[in-house]
Structure formats: C-alpha cells, structure tokens
Image (cartoon, rainbow, N blue to C red):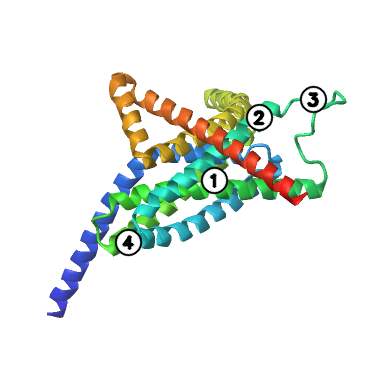
C-alpha cells in the first residue's frame, strides 16, 4: 500500500514537472520579443561606464532585477486574484514612465554635444571619484527602475499563460521564468559590454596555423564591431523604450487597440513592421506629452514655492 502511494506521488510530481516545463517553454516564446527589448534597454543603461566598472554595474543591476522579480511575482499573483483589472492599469502607468524615460534619453543624446556660451562643450562624463560614484549610482538606479517595468510585462505575460493552472504550477512557472530570463538577459549584457576585451584576447592569441589565423581575425572583427554595437545599442535601447511603453499604453486603451489592429490587418506582409512602427510613434507621443506635463508641473511648483 505504501509502495503504491509512493509511486502515485512520484507520478504526480512527474506530471507536475512536465506541465511546468511546457508552460515555461510557452511563456519563454511569448516573452521573446520583450526579452530582446529588455536586452537592448539594459545594455544601453550600462553604456558609458569605465571599463573596470562595467561588470560590477551589470552585477548590481542583476541583483536589483532579481529583487524586482521577488517583489513582482507574489504581487502579481495577489493582485490578479484580488483585483485583476488593476494589472493593466499599472502596466499602462509603467509604459508611460518608459516613454518618458525614452524621450528624456533622446533629448540628452541630441543635446550632448551642444556648446555652451563660452564655446566649449558641456562636460558629459564625471571627473572626480565622488562624481563617478554618483554617476554610477544613478545609472544603476535608473536601470533597476526600467528593469522593474520590463520585468512586470514578462511576469504578466507568463501569468496570463498559466491563468488556468493550479496555484502551485503558477508559482513555480513564474519563478522559473523570472530566474531564467534574468540570467539570460544580464549574461548577454555582460558579454556585450566586455566584447572588446574578448576581441583583444583573441587578437593576441598565440595559436598557430590556420586555426590561429582564424582566431586572430575573429578578434579583430570583434574589436572593430564593439564600438559600433555599443553606439547602436544606445539608440536601439531608447527606441525599445518607446516600443514597449507604446505597446503597454495601446493595450490598455481599447479604441486605440482596435485602431492599431485595423492598421496591422491591412498591412498583410508588413504586420510586424507596422506594429512596431505604430507602437514606437505612440510611445514617442506619450513620452513627449509626459515630459511636457512634468515640465509644466515643475514650473508651477517652483513658482508656488518662490
């Protein structure tokens, strides 16, 4: 009797693991587009750091991302059970914040090389140790805030997939997706920011023969590609903020969702490009509006104080 009970328990565990594995795969596929945006945004956040501080910054943001998900998973489960409608409103608010950050980043990029009244360029990088430490802290804090919103979308996507599963399956699937996605994103970010070091090591390789030639040429390619990739990611990450934020806002407003769906359906073979383009435009408009509103409220607040 005890033996049959044990086998039944093992069978239940095996079934549970199979179901969790299947749901995790589906969630990972559904989150793939968010993952690419997450990668671009977070890689862009750590660009501009000193070479010896890049990996510590990535590690600090990784830990912050894990804390974000440790907060988001239970909160999402509770909120979905108690007040499911609030999830989409919170995502819209997060999307608007992403659009705001994206528009601010665009402003910074476009004004970075402007000259001041004395004909000299405005300083773009901190100089003293205190300024460097403060700059790094701001970068980490900003990256963790952005990660919180992107992580929320991944958690919500996963939660929608496992909505009909048992509570245990929901919890385990969300935990698996949270851990795997975080390791995947920040592992790739770490690889991207250290790509130039990898290229230099390969270029200086002592390997002999045809294999050595291939290795050294590969190192040269990586060294040449690293600055181009870093510069590109700076813009790709900013555009991804508009893309993700615009998608959040669009999904939360039903008439806007129907309008975008109509455009996408008429695009036929260009559905993906049209979807991304419309979401980016909406995100940019939301970001511009948010920046203008913040500026107005800031001005009114300053006048009220003085």
- Mark 1 in CB contact with mark 3 (< 8 angstroms): no
- Mark 3 in CB contact with mark 2 (< 8 angstroms): no
* Nearest to N terminus: mark 1 or mark 3: 3
Circle 1: element type: helix
Mark yes or no: residue 263 visible: yes
Quarter of the rendering occupied by the N terminus: bottom left
Circle 3: element type: loop
Q: Position of residue 252 (x, y in %)?
A: 38, 42
* Nearest to N terminus: mark 2 or mark 1: 2
Q: Residues within 10 Å of mark 4 (few under 14, many from 20)?
A: few
Residue corresponding to mark 4: 81
Residue 186 lies, with reference to residue 72, above or below; the image says: above
Residue corresponding to mark 1: 146
Residue beneath the point at 19% across and 74% down: 6
- Mark 3 in CB contact with mark 4 (< 8 angstroms): no
Per the rendering, the mark at residue 109 is 2
Mark yes or no: residue 188 visible: no
- Mark 2 in CB contact with mark 1 (< 8 angstroms): no
Q: Position of residue 272 (x, y in %)?
A: 36, 26
Residue beneath the point at 54% across and 24% down: 214
Residue beneath the point at 43% across and 31% down: 279
Which residue appears farthest toward the bottom when viewing the image? 1
Q: Nearer the viewer, mark 4 or mark 1?
A: 4
* Nearest to N terminus: mark 3 or mark 4: 4
Q: Residues within 10 Å of mark 1 (few under 14, many from 20)?
A: many
Closer to us: 46 or 255 = 255
Q: Position of residue 28 (x, y in %)?
A: 35, 45
Residue beneath the point at 42% across and 49% down: 89
- Work out how far the residue at label 4 is from the one at label 2, CA to CA, in angstroms: 42 Å
């Amino acid at each position: 009797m005890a033996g049959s009970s044990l086998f039944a328990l093992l069978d239940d565990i095996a079934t549970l693991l199979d179901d969790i594995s299947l749901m995790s795969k589906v969630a990972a596929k559904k989150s793939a587009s968010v993952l690419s945006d997450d990668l671009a945004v977070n890689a862009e956040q750590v660009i501009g750091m000193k070479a010896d501080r890049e990996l510590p910054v990535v590690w600090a943001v990784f830990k912050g991302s894990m804390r974000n998900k440790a907060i988001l998973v239970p909160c999402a489960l509770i909120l979905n059970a108690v007040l499911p409608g609030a999830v989409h409103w919170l995502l819209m608010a997060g999307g608007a914040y992403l659009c705001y950050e994206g528009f601010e980043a665009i402003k910074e990029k476009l004004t970075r090389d402007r000259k001041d009244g004395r004909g000299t360029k405005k300083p773009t990088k901190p100089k003293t140790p205190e300024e460097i430490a403060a700059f790094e802290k701001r970068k980490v804090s900003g990256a963790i805030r952005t990660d919180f919103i992107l992580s929320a979308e991944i958690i919500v996507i996963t939660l929608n997939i496992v909505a009909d599963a048992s509570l245990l399956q929901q919890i385990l699937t969300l935990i698996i997706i949270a851990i795997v996605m975080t390791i995947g994103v920040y592992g790739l970010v770490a690889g991207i920011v250290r790509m130039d070091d990898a290229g230099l090591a390969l270029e200086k390789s002592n390997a002999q023969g045809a294999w050595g030639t291939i290795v050294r040429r590969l190192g040269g390619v990586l060294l040449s590609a690293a600055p181009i990739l870093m510069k590109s990611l700076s813009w790709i990450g900013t555009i991804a903020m508009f893309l993700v934020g615009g998608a959040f806002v669009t999904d939360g407003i039903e008439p806007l969702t129907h309008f975008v769906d109509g455009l996408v359906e008429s695009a036929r073979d260009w559905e993906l490009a049209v979807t991304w383009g419309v979401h980016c435009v909406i995100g940019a408009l939301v970001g511009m509006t948010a920046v203008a509103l913040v500026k107005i409220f800031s001005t009114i607040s300053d006048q009220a104080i003085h």
